[in-house]
Image (cartoon, helix red, strand yellow):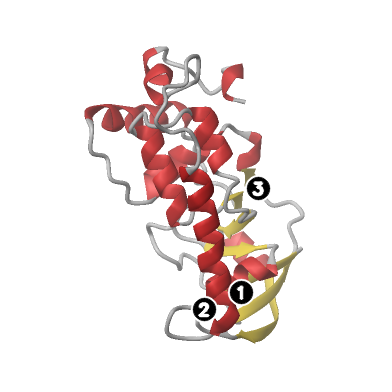
Amino acid sequence: MVLYHGSNRIIEEPTYRGGKKHNDYGHGFYCTEYPDVAREWAVSANSDGYLNVYEMDMLGLNVLRLDEHSALTWLAILLQNRIFTVDTPLALEAKGYIIDEFGIDYSQCDVIIGYRADDSYFTFAQDFLRNVISYEQLVRAMHLGNLGEQIVLKSKEAFDRITYTSHEIVNRDPWLDRRIRRDSRARKSYFSMDRESYMHGALYVSRIVDEEMKRDDARLR
């Protein structure tokens, strides 16, 4: 598998247990199979960046694929790692319920493959916890940014399997502009949803909690 990582520096040897504690899936090395997405995230408002290229042998690794679970499992992992604003009694109860009922033990996983959660995605997730949007709308919103999946190395075994092959310099223009436009499109599409009307029969977080829905509920697929 060829993997890409956007950064402000060349990374020939990714550091095990590196990365930020409050990233999507905690400590790890975050990569993508999509070079243009990595290029967008390599640059900042003040500087150019680097596209780091790797090869990785995935054979025999313990891989958690979040697309095999409901979106609530993805959300549960984010709630455990990222810093969320939980500002209502319902949101606080929903956070605990989702972590308890839909969270999974990924401590023995070598690699996690799942959605990338940029800043827009946290607007979506927070609105879901606040009962503003339904589960169906949350799932639809997760695809708006067209970010693809991220591949996160978690274990020492996974880090032993990745090999640096090359890098390229990524100019701030046009990649920063592309990232901003991608985020803007996602937000525009999200806010064009009918978020003000109550969707009768939809799965709002209040209903999920009240009915004590579990991970095997067919309605969450």
Dot 1, how many residues are within 10 Å of its Cα: few (below 14), some (14-19), or many (20+)? many
Q: Tags 2 and 1 in contact by the CB under 8 Å rule?
A: yes
Nearest the camera: 58 or 160? 58
Distance CA(mark 2)–CA(mark 3):
32 Å
Residue at 60% from the left image edge and 41% from the top image edge: 66
**Do the residues bearing badges 2 and 3 touch, measured as CB atoms within 8 Å?**
no
* Label 3 to label 1: alpha-carbon separation: 28 Å
Q: Give amino acid for label 1.
A: Arg
Q: Name the N-terminal-most of marks 3 and 1.
A: 1
- Residue carrying label 3: 62
- Does residue 26 appear in this view? no
Q: How far apart, in angstroms, are the residues tagged by discs 2 and 1? A: 7 Å
- Looking at the image, residue 96 sits to the left or right of residue 34; the answer is left
Percent position of residue 191, x then y = 46, 44
Judging by the rendered image, the residue that carries numbered circle 1 is: 39
Residue 44 coordinates in the image, percent (x, y): 46, 78
Nearer to us of marks 3 and 1 is: 1
Quarter of the view holding residue 126: top left
Question: Crowding near pointer 3: few (<14 within 10 Å), some, many (20+)?
Answer: some
Q: Amino acid at mark 3?
A: Asn
Residue, disc 2:
43
Tell me whether circle 3 and circle 1 mark residues in contact (CB < 8 Å): no
Q: Where in the figure is residue 109, as x and y percent of width and height?
A: 58, 48
* Nearer to us in this view, 198 or 15: 198
